[in-house]
Image (spheres, rainbow, N blue to C red):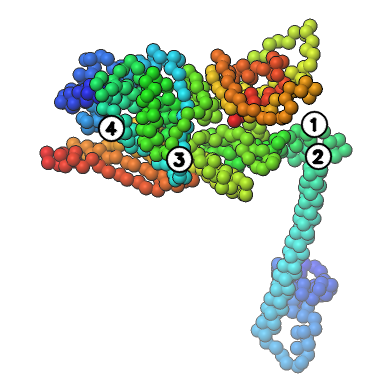
Amino acid sequence: VAGGRGRAPEEEELLLPPHRRFPRDRGGPTPAFSLAGECRGRMEEGKAHSPHEVFAHLEMLEAQARAADVKEEEAKRQAEKLDRLKARVRELTCQRDELQAKVDLQQKGQLGKEGVVSDPAQPSAHAVLEWKIKNVKDMLQVFYLTGISGKLTEQGVCFCISTAYEGTYLDSYYLDLLTKPQVYIFRHSIPTFIPLAQLAKKYLQTDIRRFLSVLSNHLNAYAARRYQADQLQEHFSDQIEGTLQTNSLCNLLVFNYNVSNKSKTFPFNVRLLYGDLCSSVPTKVTVSCTPGYWLGKCHR
Amino acid sequence: MDEIVAEYIRRTVLKIPRDQIRTMLQQWGFLSEAQLQAINFCQIKDSISQDVVQLCEQFLFFLDNYIYSNKRLWSVYQMNKRGEETDFFDLTDFKKKFKRRLQSALTNVTINFREYEDNAIWIRIAWGTPYTKPNQYKTSYVVYHSQTPYVFISVSVLKSNLPLLCQALVAASNYHDIREMELRSHYLNSLKDIVFKSYSQNFQSYYPKPLQERNVAPENLMIIQENKNEKERIKRVNSEVFGDGPQPKLEFAQYKLETIFKSDPQMNVLNRKVPFRCLVKFSSPHLLESLKSLAPEGMADAPVSPLLTCFVNP
């Protein structure tokens, strides 16, 4: 009872590895005679196994073979994946080396077009100089934007304090200092109402950093208060009665406005006092309503 | 404007019904449309009438300045404060105190105030005597920037009233005393520039300043400039001291100087080197501009002596 198609099934199946002797996709009845050792062995035990047992055994072996197949496939897949990853690693390492080389070249002053590394054998001196100048200019711009910047002069240093409020840059003020025999202010453009003399007396000789910091606070707060007062006047001119009353330091702001409710209008007076000269926020606010007038309206 | 007149205007405007005030002013036709628009007719009547009085006062200041613009001679005074507390300058408070102080000493005096945009307070004072009404033709003007120690006073003929005026200023601005500085000019703005240092000074900085267009005359190649480097150096050094912008117009300045006479030792003019004191007076139609041109014109070495640049760099 040989299966197959004109071959000697026993021969073929004996050539295949043991777990391959029963391929799943082969048609035909499973040849009973190819059970080389096992079945015969069992048969030789003397017992006459029922076809049921044989089939069960065959099924078990088939399942084993299938499992082995799956395992082999899995292992093959893993191996392939490993190969792929190894290749990727090699690729990335190569890329990293390339970029590192580019960075090294750039740091040495070699300039190249974007993405393309210039030929290190021919650096453009003009390009290098341009790049250096741009770098320095940017750095100086950064210093200026920090609010306090300076430049050494022949006999001392000239500081520039720039003011800003909520993203808007306002005026800049200058301090020309001489350093010999002591640090003193040669000339400046600080407004007269900023207590410069007081601050200089306190800090200039002992702690110049603190002096500049405190002066910068005063100037920034003043600029912010003035800017806010200007903005108030500009954007709310229709609601404010008359003009805003302030002073040089803008540390006292007084204005009037009306609150209307149907037919009644209530005049309000606002008084903002900025007790801290280094702050752009008022320390005391007084809002009052003209008493007699309200009562008058009420009676009517 | 006379106080009594001002009061009359205020009371009369109050008598007019609110909705007719605007029409009345328009009929009069004296105030421009812009001035009418500046008055808020929705505020309480008292405020409206105050606004009208203020507008009339403004015309007074305008008229005075129109006629006497550069004929008035201004002097600078400096005030001193004892303490170091923060000054919360209240304009209403200042005006009240000043008026009260002056009017308590002199009954016949009219005082008007005007505030300008640069925080300058102008005070117009017409002086009278106990027996005569205030003379509107001979007025004193005071210009004061709050929270600064400087006051600009236009010297009036009635110098006897000056101490009283100074006292009133000191009391109203919460200072302690006042003294005259050695600065006088017909040009108020120039005095302000010098005292507040608001003229253009050249400060060295890395921050690129906007380039100023300068009209450079086309160079004639047939003319060779000798000492071109030296000329440039003088220009640069001069520019550092005086700045590039127009100089404040100073006409008169003086200072006291203590110095030693320098002479050839062989001449034996003075046996001992005794320092002597002197008063140096400068007068010119435009003092600072002429000092600035000393070095470029070759009349002095650059940098110019500090004895001459002390007006810009005290």
Badge 2, how many Cα within 10 Å: few under 14, some, many 20+? Answer: many
Identified at 49% across, 42% down, the residue is A221
Per the image, the residue denoted by label 4 is B104
Identified at 78% across, 8% down, the residue is B223
Chain under callout 4 = B
What's the amino acid at mark 1? Answer: His
Chain under callout 2 = A
Badge 4, how many Cα within 10 Å: few under 14, some, many 20+? Answer: few
- Left or right: residue B187 versus residue B281 is left
Depth-wise, is mark 4 or mark 3 nearer the camera? 4
Residue A126 disc label:
1
Residue under disc 2 on the same chain as residue under disc 4: no
Badge 3, how many Cα within 10 Å: few under 14, some, many 20+? Answer: some
Q: Earlier in the sequence, mark 4 or mark 3?
A: 3
Q: Estimate the x, y position of residue B69 in percent, counting from the top left.
A: 42, 15
Q: Spatial distance from mark 2 to mark 4, Cα to Cα?
A: 83 Å
Residue B81 disc label:
3
For label 4, the SS is: helix
Task: Pick out the residue farthest to the front.
Answer: B271
Q: Earlier in the sequence, mark 2 or mark 1?
A: 2
For label 1, the SS is: helix
Whether residues under marks 2 and 1 lie with C-beta atoms below 8 angstroms apart, the answer is no
Q: Estimate the x, y position of residue A93 in percent, counting from the top left.
A: 79, 54
